[in-house]
Amino acid sequence: MIHRAIYHAIGNTPIIGVPITSGKLYAKLEYLNPGGSVKDRSALYMIEYAEKHGQLKPGGTIIDASSGNQGIAMAMIGAAKGYTVIICVSEKISQEKLQTLRAYGAQVHIFPTTDSLDHPESYHAHAIKLHQQTPNSFMPNQYYNILNAQAHYKLLGPEIWQQTEGHITHLFAAAGTGGTISGAGRFLKEQNPNIRIIAIDSINSYRATNGHPKPYHIEGMGVDFISPVYDEAIIDEAILVSDQQALSILATLSHQHGLLVGPSSGAVCFAAMHYAQNHFCSKDIGIMIFGDSGRAYLTRNYYASDQQEDSLKLVKTENSESLTIR
Ligand SMILES: Cc1ncc(COP(=O)(O)O)c(C=O)c1O
């Protein structure tokens, strides 16, 4: 098939076996989307919804806050559709993502990391201010806009259902906004209410600590605010994962399986493996969403051999009891 524009190539990502997980867990490689992450889907959906409803007009400016990937998706789609794109990020963003945003021609504003998104100095609060000051601008507001989850209800959920021919029993996805897990999860539960929908969150996030967050390094994953995008009614449980646990599996995935994935995918894989070990029966099939590529984190040295040795030691010392399941 020939696509008219880059954003028409979003979706239809492959699901592949991950041998490390003894054949019960499969990964949906969302990093093979053209912008390199699962967020291509939500960005495209929100932009096209805004175009359809007159919120985004030709010559307009797209402004949003992002941990990086939603911004990259907006920058890629904005470039192809002729919009100016301004992205507000926290200083936690990797150099690779920062440079990618700029390479797509986006303007990037960087702000110090705050405990919560609702903090008046957060990158999200600054994006709102910028939007209010900028004529003919549109703010998708991925953190609070339920269209974010709806995108995954319309696109990702049906794709997983079709690709697994209805045999999926568990969905594992990292939660940042909660859009991916809530939207895809809602669609899958409508097809079969017995499918377990499992969110992976950082052990130090705002949500995981009941409003007393501690710093953590993983980008994209971690629920740092309370919003309707994270749908409690759909998510059966949240598994909380530490930075160390998430990183501990990355070198193994890349060195032994050719899966060069980012830390949120490491968290998902780590949590899903432990969950499957303890809870799966023989017919269970789990789909893990691998949200972005390790290429966005190469300067972080997560994938070196010495890191792998340390990682293996870590995996051995961290048993499943160190995972918090809610
Ligand atoms: C790499 C990665 N994984 C997972 C997520 C979480 O997705 P969601 O915001 O839909 O919960 C994000 C969000 O930015 C991400 O960038």
Image (cartoon, grey):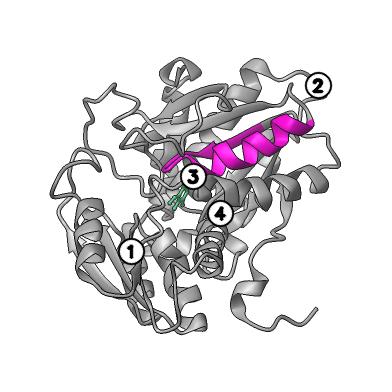
* Dot 3 and dot 2 residues touching (CB under 8 Å): no
Residue 154, how many percent across, how many down?
A: 67, 50
Nearer to us of marks 4 and 1 is 1
The residue to which callout 4 is attached is: 255
Q: Amino acid at mark 2?
A: Ser
In this rendering, position of residue 15 left or right of residue 250 = right
Q: Is residue 170 magenta?
A: no
Q: Can you say whether 31 is above or below 204 in the image?
A: below
Nearer to us of marks 1 and 3 is 3
Q: Earlier in the sequence, mark 4 or mark 1?
A: 4
* Helix, strand or loop for the magenta stretch, by majority: helix
The residue to which callout 2 is attached is: 282
Task: Report the Cα–Cα distance between label 4 and label 1.
Answer: 17 Å
The residue to which callout 3 is attached is: 146
Task: Report the Cα–Cα distance between label 2 and label 4.
Answer: 28 Å
Q: Foreground residue, 164 or 88?
A: 88
Q: Foreground residue, 76 or 31?
A: 76
- The quadrant of the rendering that contains the N terminus is bottom right
Q: Earlier in the sequence, mark 1 or mark 3?
A: 3
Look at the numbered disc 4 and give the secondary structure of its residue.
helix
Q: Tag 1: Cα neighbours inside 10 Å, few (<14), some, or many (≥20)?
A: few
Q: Earlier in the sequence, mark 3 or mark 4?
A: 3
User: Which segment is the magenta one?
Assistant: 171-191
Residue 228, how many percent across, how many down?
A: 44, 35
Task: Report the Cα–Cα distance between label 3 and label 2.
Answer: 36 Å
Camera sees residue 232: yes
Q: Can you say whether 75 is above or below 40 in the image?
A: below
The residue to which callout 1 is attached is: 299
Look at the numbered disc 3 and give the secondary structure of its residue.
loop
Look at the numbered disc 2 and give the secondary structure of its residue.
loop
Q: Amino acid at mark 1?
A: Thr
